[in-house]
Image: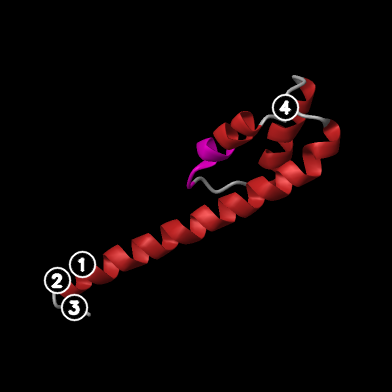
Amino acid sequence: MSDLLKKTVLAGIGAVSLTKDKAKELADELVERGEMDESDEAEFIKELMDKSEKKKEELEGTIEEKVNETFEKMDIA
């Protein structure tokens, strides 16, 4: 699969939480359209899941930070 396509798909995932079933569904669609080899499917799914988890953790950290800042400004913390 081309790096550009892979980067585009991964960028599109963003902070969205992704289930393994949805990742498999996307991979199957890419294979069906001939945009990815079937032999790359498992690695692609793992990469999507890893990126999704990382983005989710980053978002949670940002939210926690902003909530704490707000509490401090309100003198609640």
Percent from the top left, x then y, of residue 70? 20, 67
Percent from the top left, x then y, of residue 54? 54, 57
- Which of the marked residues, 4 or 3, is nearer the chain's N terminus? 4
Q: Is residue 69 above or below residue 25?
A: below
Residue 30 marker: 4
Q: Is residue 47 above or below residue 10?
A: below
Q: Mark 1 near mark 2, Cβ–Cβ under 8 Å? A: yes
Q: Relative to residue 46, is residue 63 drawn left or right? A: left
Disc 3 and disc 2: Cα gap in Å? 8 Å
Residue 1, quarter of picture: top right
Specify start and end residues of the magenta stretch as a single range: 10-15
- Which of the marked residues, 4 or 1, is nearer the chain's N terminus? 4
Give yes or no for residue 34 being in the magenta stretch. no
Q: Report the residue marked by disc 3.
A: 76
Total of numbered circles in the picture? 4
Residue 73 marker: 2
Q: Amino acid at mark 1?
A: Thr
Q: Report the residue marked by disc 1.
A: 70
Q: Residue at x 49, y 61 (%)?
A: 57
Q: Amino acid at mark 3?
A: Ile
